[in-house]
Amino acid sequence: MKLQTIIPLKKQSKNLIDYHSNILLLGSCFVENIGEKLTYFKFQTLQNPFGILFQPKAIETFVANVISQKTYSENDIFFHNEQWHCFDAHSRLSASSKEHLLTELNNQIKSTNQQISKATHIIITLGTAWVYRFLESNQVVANCHKVPQNQFKKELLSVEEIAQSLQTMAQLIQSVNPKASIIFTVSPVRHTKDGFVENTLSKAHLITAIHQVIPSLGARVLYFPSFEMMMDELRDYRFYAEDMLHPNATAIQYIWEKFQYVWFSEAASKTMEAVGAIQKGLQHKPFNPNSEAHQQFLQNLKAQINRLCSQFPHISF
């Protein structure tokens, strides 16, 4: 008797993720869940340099500015609620000093420009098709930074607008790095503040646009069905956090394991086991830190770390 519908997944045969891979992650908060797993297992990653970017236009703007190596100036930032902000970035980058904000913005542009050129995999997670347009400049913003809502116009991007945005960002990436695999996903997080029907419409626009544009972008642009897994395989509120909107740790782990099956090489999975064992060892709290047994445990752990770091110099604990 089957008690669950399972989405069929095909193991990738080319450009699998291993410990020599460089991974760039961009997009909504769900990409941060995957990024945290990659960081825990010591992969080479750069995650959301401008903070969480929920919608495709914000990601497109960021990618375009990275590739053109835009230099942010005072004209690109503003002061509100005792902090300096940039409409292109999440409030995580906001600062009390405009010099600090500009330095951070330009440093992130520079580091991402280097990463995007050498990345083997670029994971882009779309969260919503709803956007806010700042009326004064007619600019679609990445974040409103608590500026009064009457200064914005809320809009739903059409399928055609999203498809054009995805095509632009993919082609920009391919212009500097044609060998990178670009993996699009849709976040399973529901944006109920937009309304339940409106959230469903938003996700439908995103999914339709992705599948409309992928065939024209070449074999290195693919889709991973994280949204579908949450909606169909994990169709139960026990897989949600307390807000009943975000996936909980069990759901994130489930989708992570599916992603690992599709995208990770066998060698990477074995190294992950070694990294995981070390991470657990480092978190171990002994009953008697001075005991001979614990000292031997620490020596063995240090030997494991040295062996792994000699094999992969970028790894550090």
Image (spheres, rainbow, N blue to C red):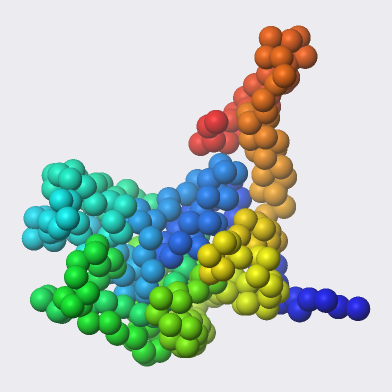
**129 vs 252: above or below:** below
Residue 176 in picture, x, y percent from top left: 35, 63
In-image side of 172 versus 96 (left or right): right
In this view of the protein, which residue sits in the foreground, 213 or 193? 193
Q: Residue at x 63, y 77 (%)?
A: 231
In-image side of 45 versus 281 (left or right): left
In-image side of 176 versus 203 (left or right): left
Furthest-left residue in this view? 75
> Is residue 115 something that shows in the picture?
yes
**287 vs 141: above or below:** above
Q: Residue at x 53, y 50 (%)?
A: 36
- Looking at the rendered image, the quarter that the N terminus falls into is bottom right
Furthest-front residue in this view? 242
**237 vs 275: above or below:** below
Number of callouts in the render? 0
In this view of the protein, which residue sits in the foreground, 106 or 128? 128
> Is residue 167 something that shows in the picture?
no
Q: Residue at x 76, y 79 (%)?
A: 5
Q: Residue at x 53, y 32 (%)?
A: 316
Residue 296 in picture, x, y percent from top left: 74, 14
Residue 292 in picture, x, y percent from top left: 76, 9
Residue 310 in picture, x, y percent from top left: 59, 29
**Residue 51 is drawn in which quadrant?**
bottom left
In this view of the protein, which residue sits in the foreground, 300 or 242? 242
**Residue 75 is drawn in which quadrant?**
bottom left
- Looking at the rendered image, the quarter that the C terminus falls into is top right
